[in-house]
Image (cartoon, helix red, strand yellow):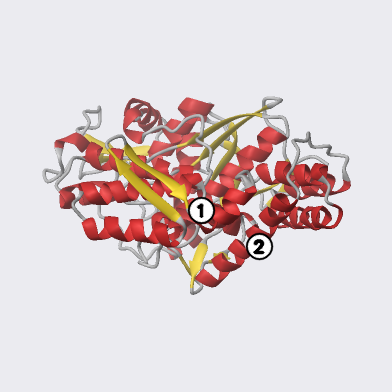
C-alpha cells in the first residue's frame, strides 16, 4: 500500500508521491516567538515530527522547514512591555522553544528560518506582485494585496469572496479597497522601535505576517513543493493568503498537499493565548513526564480535536507504562523491521493511511500482549522499533518506570534549567519548589561549581 494523505485543498485523501522522486520537501508554519509555547503548539510540532519520521522510514529524503516568526505586533508589544530589545526577546523565546521541543523528543527541522533574515526576499515578492497589479500602495503608506484580482482566492477555505466578506466583522479600513485585502508591507510608525524598521522601495517599514512564510518557503524549497502544514486555525486567512501571494507572484501552485492538524480543546474550546485557556508546555511538564505528553498527542489522529485534561493525561501515562512494562519484563533485542510481519504490516498500513497513529498505537499494545504471553525478545525488539517511528519507547524501561516515576532525561534537564533560570532571576521560592517537586518524584539534585547533576533514588 502506498502513502495516502488528506489534502485540505482537495478535501480528499489522495495518493502521495513527491514531485522529485525520493525527495519530499515540506514547510510547516512555526511559532510567533513572543511567549512560551503552549500545548497547542506542541501538538503541531509533534504531528509534523511524526509525519517527517514516517516519510524517512518510508525511504524518502526529507527537507523539512519550520519557520520562526520573529517580527510581529505582539512581539513588539511584549518587548516594549519588558523593556528589552526585539532580538533579546525573540532569542530568549527561541531558546525556550528548543528546550521544550527537545524535551518532547521533537527532531529539529533541517531549516528553521527567522523571518527577519528574509526581508530582501519578501521585498522582491512584493515588488513582483505590484508589477502584476496584485498589490497597491495605500494612502497610509502600507502596501496591500488586492484579493479580488487573484482568481483563485478562497480555494483552500472552500468559500467564495462574497461568503468570506460576509464573515468579516471588522469595519473596512479606509486605506483598503476591499475588507479582505491584507497588508504586505506595513509603513513604519513613529512609536515603533528602530530595530523593526527596514528601508524599502515602498518606504521604511516592516513585512506583514503572511508574506513572511511565502518568501521563506519559496526561497528554501522552490516555488512549488510537496507538503505545506500547520494548525487548522491557519487555513484561513494565513494559508489562503500565502497561496494568493506565492501563486500570484510565481504563476504556479505553492504546495501540492496541504495538511492541517486539529486543535487541542479545553472545555470544548480551542486552547489559545487569546482565550486565556492555555497551558504552556513547561506547565504541563511540571505535572507529567514528556513522553506521556507526547503519547497523549500521538495516540489521537492528527486531524481530530483533542481534549486536554489531567484525567486524559493520567490515562495516557498508565497506558504508556503498560508498554514499558512489557519491554522491562522481556528486554528487547535490536531488530530490523520486517514489514511482511503481520503486525508490522498493520502498523505500516495504518501510517500509510493519512498517518493513522491511533491504529498504529493499537498495534503496539497487541505486540506488548504478545511479549507478555510468549516472552519473545524479538517481539519486544519489534515493539521498541515500531514505537521509535512515533518517537516513543526509546528510554531504558527500568529507568522510565522507576526513575522519577517515569521522568526521562530530557524532562529532568528541562526542570534543572527552569530551576537555574529561577535562581538567576532571584526567584528562590520557585527554585526550591522545582527541587522539592523533583525530590518527591525520586530525583535528587546535586549542585556544584561545575553545575547541577541528578540521580534517582533507588
Locate residue 269 relative to residue 334 in the image: left or right: left
The quarter holding residue 368 reads bottom right
Local crowd at mark 2 within 10 Å, few (<14), some, or many (≥20)?
Answer: some
Percent across and percent down for residue 203 are 20, 32
Position of the N terminus, as image quadrant, is: top right
Locate residue 308 relative to residue 3 in the image: left or right: left
Q: Nearer the viewer, residue 419 or 268?
A: 419
Q: Which residue is mark 1?
A: 407
Q: Nearer the viewer, residue 143 or 6?
A: 6
Percent across and percent down for residue 173 are 27, 56
- Label 1 sits on a secondary structure element that is loop
Q: Which residue is mark 2?
A: 319
Local crowd at mark 1 within 10 Å, few (<14), some, or many (≥20)?
Answer: many
Locate residue 138 relative to residue 413 in the image: left or right: left
Is tag 1's residue or tag 2's residue first in the polypeptide sequence? 2
What residue sits 34% from the left and 57% below the top?
434
The quarter holding residue 438 reads bottom left
Q: Nearer the viewer, residue 313 or 350?
A: 313
Percent across and percent down for residue 187 are 21, 40
Locate residue 413 relative to residue 338 in the image: left or right: left
Q: Nearer the viewer, residue 249 or 379?
A: 379
Instruction: Report the label total.
Output: 2
Relative to 335, residue 454 above or below = below
Residue placed farthest to the front in the image? Answer: 458
What residue sits 72% from the left and 39% below the top?
16
Residue placed farthest to the left in the image? Answer: 190
Amino acid at each position: 500500500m502506498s502513502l495516502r494523505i488528506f489534502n485540505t485543498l482537495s478535501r480528499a485523501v489522495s495518493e502521495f508521491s513527491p514531485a522529485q522522486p525520493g525527495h519530499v520537501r515540506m514547510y510547516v508554519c512555526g511559532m510567533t516567538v513572543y511567549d512560551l509555547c503552549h500545548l497547542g503548539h506542541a501538538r503541531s510540532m509533534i504531528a509534523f515530527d511524526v509525519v517527517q519520521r514516517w516519510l524517512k522510514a518510508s525511504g524518502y529524503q526529507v527537507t523539512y522547514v519550520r519557520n520562526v516568526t520573529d517580527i510581529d505586533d505582539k512581539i513588539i508589544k511584549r518587548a516594549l512591555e519588558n523593556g528589552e530589545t526585539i532580538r533579546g526577546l525573540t532569542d530568549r523565546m527561541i531558546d525556550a522553544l528548543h528546550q521544550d521541543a527537545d524535551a518532547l523528543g521533537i527532531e529539529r527541522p533541517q531549516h528553521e528560518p527567522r523571518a527577519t533574515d528574509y526581508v530582501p526576499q519578501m521585498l522582491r515578492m512584493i515588488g513582483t506582485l505590484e508589477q502584476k497589479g496584485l498589490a497597491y500602495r495605500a494612502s497610509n503608506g502600507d502596501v496591500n494585496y488586492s484579493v479580488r484580482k487573484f482568481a483563485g482566492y478562497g480555494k483552500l477555505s472552500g468559500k467564495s469572496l462574497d461568503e468570506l466578506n460576509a464573515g468579516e466583522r471588522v469595519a473596512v479600513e479606509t486605506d483598503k479597497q476591499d475588507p479582505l485585502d491584507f497588508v504586505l508591507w506595513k509603513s513604519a510608525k513613529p512609536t515603533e522601535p528602530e530595530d523593526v524598521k527596514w528601508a524599502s522601495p515602498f518606504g521604511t517599514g516592516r513585512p506583514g505576517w503572511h508574506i513572511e512564510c511565502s518568501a521563506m518557503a519559496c526561497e528554501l524549497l522552490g516555488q512549488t513543493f510537496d507538503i505545506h502544514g500547520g494548525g487548522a486555525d491557519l487555513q484561513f486567512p494565513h494559508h489562503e493568503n500565502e497561496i494568493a501571494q506565492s501563486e500570484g507572484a510565481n504563476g504556479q501552485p505553492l504546495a501540492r498537499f496541504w495538511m492541517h492538524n486539529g486543535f487541542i480543546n479545553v472545555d470544548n474550546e480551542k486552547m489559545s493565548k487569546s482565550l486565556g485557556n492555555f497551558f504552556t508546555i513547561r506547565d504541563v511538564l511540571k505535572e507529567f513526564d514528556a513522553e506521556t505528553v507526547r503519547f497523549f498527542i500521538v495516540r489521537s489522529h492528527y486531524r481530530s480535536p483533542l481534549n486536554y485534561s489531567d484525567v486524559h493525561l493520567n490515562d495516557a501515562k498508565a497506558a504508556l507504562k503498560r508498554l514499558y512494562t512489557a519491554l522491562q519484563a522481556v528486554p528487547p533485542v535490536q531488530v530490523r523491521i520486517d514489514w511482511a510481519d503481520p503486525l508490522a504490516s498493520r502498523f505500516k498500513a495504518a501510517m500509510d493511511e493519512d498517518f493513522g497513529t491511533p491504529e498504529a498505537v493499537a498495534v503496539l499494545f497487541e505486540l506488548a500482549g504478545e511479549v507478555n504471553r510468549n516472552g519473545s525478545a524479538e517481539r519486544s525488539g519489534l515493539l521498541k522499533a515500531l514505537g521509535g517511528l512515533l518517537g516513543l519507547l526509546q528510554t531504558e524501561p527500568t529507568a522510565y518506570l522507576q526513575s522519577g516515576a517515569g521522568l526521562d532525561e530530557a524532562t529532568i534537564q528541562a526542570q534543572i534549567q527552569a530551576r537555574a533560570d529561577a535562581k538567576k532571576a532571584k526567584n528562590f521560592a520557585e527554585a526550591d519548589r522545582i527541587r522539592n517537586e523533583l525530590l518527591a518524584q525520586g530525583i535528587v539534585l546535586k549542585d556544584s561549581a561545575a553545575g547541577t547533576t541528578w540521580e534517582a533514588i533507588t
